[in-house]
Amino acid sequence: MKRLLSLIAISAALAFGGNALAQEKKADAPAAAPAAAASADAKPAEPAPAVPGAPAAAAPAAAPAAAPAPTPNKGDVAWLLTSTALVLLMSVPALALFYGGMVRSKNMLSVLMQVFVVFSLIVVLWCVYGYSLAFTEGNAYIGGLDRLFLNGTFDAAKGEFAMAATFSKNTPIPELLFVAFQATFAAITCALILGAFAERVKFSAVLLFMVIWFTFAYAPIAHMVWFWAGPDAYTDPKLVDGLNAKAGLIWQWGALDFAGGTVVHINAGVAGLIGAYLVGRRVGFGKEKMTPHNLPMTMIGASLLWFGWFGFNAGSALEANNFAVLAFMNTFLATACAVLSWIFFEWMFKGKPSMLGAASGAVAGLVAITPAAGNVGIPGAFAIGLIAGAVCLWGVSGLKKMLKVDDSLDVFGVHALGGILGAILTGVFNSPALGGPGFTADWVTGTVIKAADYSIVSQVITQAKAVGVTVIWTGIVAFIAYKIADLVIGLRVPEEEEREGLDITAHGESAYN
Amino acid sequence: MKLVTAIIKPFKLDEVREALSAIGVQGITVTEVKGFGRQKGHTELYRGAEYVVDFLPKVKIEAAIKSELLDQVIEAIEKSANTGKIGDGKIFVFDLEQVVRIRTGETGAEAL
């Protein structure tokens, strides 16, 4: 533990030192940022539209001196502020309670603590370097360091806020708002992983793993999927290729991920699965009873997740517009469908419809509709919800038995599987022929693809490629990160401590007295 | 003196207590217990994990009584705790050597 603390101290010192350097450098060359932002000379045409996460760095600053810069719409700002707070609610307390209710009472606080602290840790790292790596211009895989410590998002001397792009031209939002919104995504993604190795992992090892995985898996994948120059830069067909080339790899392919099927759920789900294998099974797994200690808390957690998810999905439109409404409705409907489908299949094949089943079905539906939220129409929401309930039920029962893994809270069965399903079906139900909105085929004119030109097959292939890259990337990074945490600290608590429970042995307190 | 111990279904506790009071039993001790008998347990299913719960919750009551009351007590418990379904429980009877009331030091039947 002391070793870990000193590690943290050293890295903090380095980070702050780095920031000081960055500040000095900035003083030397104050004009650097705007110059880089001159991406206004390149414009793209063919990629997908509903990709959230428009980067701020490049697009807005490029506004020519002549026209006055557009100001943010107050409705957009208000909605995104609200959405950000809603996504915070999804982690603490919603996810913490959802997970906490499913573990044994002796480990309740350890789960709450891990979610609470990992969330906080990632928000801090996000503001130190994560945002910059994910959402500034770099190469197709990772961004740059222009925004270290959120440098340049607010100019105190001039009292000016930098602007970030949305999905509509001349509709900026303050970049700091985009930073905050995306911070909650990064943080909840990391917190999701915790369910896979709950009840036996060492707290300090979790923190070290999260730092590594966040840096080398979350930030690059967010960049690959969501970084692009923003619609304002696309002013002339001649610029399109150049602008597209500056976007993230998966964005360039045209993969659709509205709110994080790949970036959040597949990413976390696969990292969780690797963790469950490497940390190993809980002592007594398969022999002793490991029943959820408080399903009412799990139900409250799932319900708050549903509530908060409106911010996650509808907020990902980045504007308070029609696509936010579509995402909102789809999030509503698909989740309800998944609850019904999960419990009816459970009823049919296992005898009884269960509360845990209903709560799990809701989460499965939410996960699956995430990449599709603003990318499919109402028929898509019905289909994705109904399929997700059934498939994820299989994920936590049949598939889990085949994998022979102790993924304690089914992070893989629900999040990875639901995420993959949602990502693939997004390619199907995005098609205007199936009631979907299609995607923007030409950002210069803002033209949406014609129904006749839409190929479900090719879009599904694109989606599958995005899924494949995410699975492989996060799998490799997670494997290495666990190995490092194991070597430096050790992943597991000793067996005695595991038997006594992590609440007492790791945190020195009991959930219930 | 006799000590009567009965294992009954938890929801029958009030009826049994009333029946015993009615025939003059002065006090009983109640414990929540778990156990198994012919009723067996049940199965719980949490997502993919299935657990057989062998031990079911029951209530154990203990009453120390005068020997002459025994038949009435047994009858009272038998009637009041009966549902006719499996799992109604059992009654055990022991000889009781000595009883002491702590406050006064009384012993034997006077202390009951």
Image (cartoon, coloured by chain):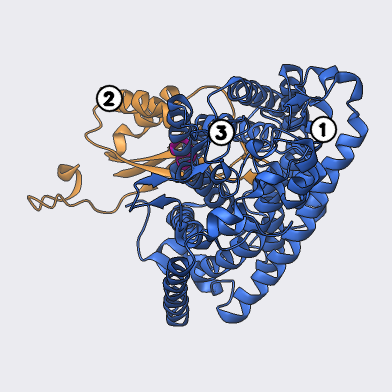
Report if residue A148 lies within the magenta region: no
Of the two numbered discs 2 and 3 in the rendering, the one whose residue sits closer to the viewer = 3
Chain letter matching colour orange = B
Of the two numbered discs 2 and 1 in the rendering, the one whose residue sits closer to the viewer = 1
Q: Residue at x 70, y 37 (%)?
A: A234
- Work out how far the residue at label 2 is from the one at label 1, CA to CA, in angstroms: 77 Å
- Work out how far the residue at label 3 is from the one at label 1, CA to CA, in angstroms: 21 Å
Looking at the figure, which quarter contains the C terminus of chain B? Answer: top left
Q: Amino acid at mark 3?
A: Leu
What span is in magenta?
Answer: A85-89
Q: Residues within 10 Å of mark 3 (few under 14, many from 20)?
A: many
Main secondary-structure element of the magenta-colored stretch = helix
Of the two numbered discs 3 and 1 in the rendering, the one whose residue sits closer to the viewer = 3
Q: Which mark is residue B23?
A: 2
Task: Give the residue furthest to the front.
Answer: A66
Q: Amino acid at mark 2?
A: Ile
SS class, disc 1: helix
Q: Are marks 3 and 1 on the same chain?
A: yes
Q: Which mark is residue A318?
A: 3
Chain letter matching colour blue = A
Q: Does residue A412 sit above or below A336 in this rendering?
A: below
Name the spot of residue A59 as percent of width and height, x first: 60, 44
- Disc 1 designates what residue? A427
Looking at the figure, which quarter contains the N terminus of chain B? Answer: top left
